[in-house]
């Protein structure tokens, strides 16, 4: 089968023939119908995350935002059969640890990130295997298309978990979104759909225009103001209720915290680059005196998929609006490399393999 393989960090992915996966007893093989192209793939391609022991080895097949059809079923799998339409979360849990049993598989003690571990090859390929398939595969409702599910991927569901669960977003809240890539635009759309007032902050005019289309009440172009945090303070007359760093660089994280009003909540969604290596200075005294909360947000518990699907069926959420371009596998290497310049608008999705 064809797959896009990371042969050398920072060099274009190689589209080549590789062996079709064989399912272990607990696994299924899924034939990929669509897979989103995420900034986390870019981080892995760059060789980031060694500072947290999560560097991705060369030889890896990336891709962790898939939807597809079950083609082969391991001998121990009980709830799936060939032909099932499925979504697969990027954080593959074991189904048995305390976090999984509590419904928080995104925090699994032995999580295997799809496409980001040599033990879990990814979905930039015609097919891929899924560990503990009975636990990790989510059957896809008929009304949700494959490319729409790929748009949900890790960015949309992460943004939903960040706002609805971690920040406990309420209607009427002002939400500052720092960085309008795929996860940032998802957060804009979700905040608007849930009755909040999103503010989009970025330095690219096209992304801010897209944010307005998705429901941003206000936009801040960081190239046109002395301080994006101060601009948010002025727009909200005292600070945002919720603020998200959707990029993961020092400036956006600090600006996000400084955008908040008293008792505001910051949610860190973007993982850092080699510039920060996970370490960012923060205004701790201000955070203490103003009782500002700092939350991390990673993926989304599997039990929340049903609510997401229901909101999509109702038309409240429309992840297809976040999708940018649809690609072939052969176009993927160039698209991934273009993320160096933060030029992609929306979520690119590979739909031809």
Image (cartoon, rainbow, N blue to C red):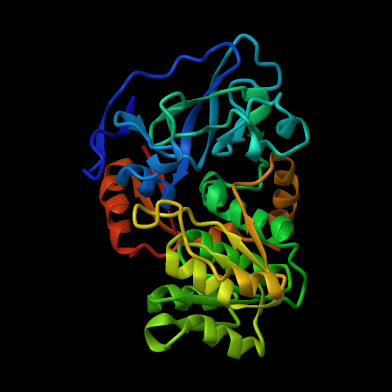
Report whether 343 appears left or right of 88: left
Query: Is residue 38 visible in this depiction of the protein?
Result: no
Q: Do we see residue 31 in this rendering?
A: yes
Residue positioned 51% across, 62% down in the render: 246
Q: Position of residue 310 (x, y in %)?
A: 75, 52
Counting from the top left corner in percent of width and height, residue 304 is at 73, 46
Q: Quadrant of the N terminus?
A: top left
Whether 230 is drawn above or below 102: the answer is below
> Splitting the image into 4 quarters, where does residue 321 fall?
bottom right
Q: 337 or 55, which is in the foreground?
A: 55
Q: Nearer the viewer, residue 283 or 179?
A: 283
From the top left corner, tell me how far across and down residue 195 is, in percent.
Answer: 73, 73
The residue shown at (54%, 48%) is: 154
Q: Residue furthest top?
A: 75
Give the side of residue 341 with respect to residue 196, left or right. left
The reply, left or right, for residue 171 in relation to residue 343 is right
Which corner quadrant holds the C terminus? top left
* Rendering coords of residue 132 (x, y %): 62, 22
| Number of on-image labels | 0
Q: Residue at x 36, y 32 (%)?
A: 61
């Amino acid at each position: 089968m064809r797959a896009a393989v990371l042969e050398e960090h920072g060099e274009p992915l190689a589209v080549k023939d590789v062996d079709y996966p064989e399912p272990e007893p607990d696994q299924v093989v899924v034939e990929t119908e669509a897979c989103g192209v995420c900034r986390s793939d870019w981080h892995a391609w760059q060789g980031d995350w060694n500072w947290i022991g999560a560097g991705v080895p060369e030889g890896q097949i990336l891709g962790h935002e898939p939807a597809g059809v079950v083609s082969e079923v391991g001998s121990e799998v009980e709830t799936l059969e060939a032909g099932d339409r499925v979504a697969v979360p990027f954080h593959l849990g074991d189904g048995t640890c305390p976090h999984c049993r509590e419904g928080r598989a995104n925090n699994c003690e032995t999580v295997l990130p799809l496409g980001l571990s040599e033990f879990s090859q990814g979905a930039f390929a015609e097919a891929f295997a899924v560990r503990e398939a009975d636990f990790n595969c989510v059957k896809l409702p008929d009304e949700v298309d494959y490319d729409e599910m790929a748009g949900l991927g890790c960015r949309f569901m992460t943004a939903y978990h960040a706002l609805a669960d971690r920040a406990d977003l309420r209607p009427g809240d002002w939400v500052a979104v720092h960085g309008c890539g795929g996860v940032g635009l998802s957060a804009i759309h979700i905040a608007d759909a849930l009755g909040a007032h999103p503010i989009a902050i970025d330095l690219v005019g096209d992304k801010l225009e897209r944010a307005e289309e998705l429901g941003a009440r206000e936009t801040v172009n960081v190239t046109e103001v002395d301080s994006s945090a101060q601009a948010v303070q002025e727009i909200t007359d005292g600070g945002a209720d919720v603020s998200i760093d959707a990029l993961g660089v020092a400036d956006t994280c600090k600006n996000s915290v400084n955008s908040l009003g008293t008792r505001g909540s910051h949610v860190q969604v973007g993982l850092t680059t080699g510039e920060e290596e996970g370490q960012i200075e923060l205004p701790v005294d201000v955070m203490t005196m103003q009782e500002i909360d700092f939350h991390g947000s990673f993926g989304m518990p599997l039990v929340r998929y049903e609510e997401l699907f229901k909101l999509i069926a109702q038309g409240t959420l429309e992840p297809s609006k976040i999708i940018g371009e649809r690609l072939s596998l052969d176009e993927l290497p160039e698209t991934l490399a273009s993320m160096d310049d933060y030029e992609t608008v929306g979520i690119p999705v590979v739909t031809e393999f």
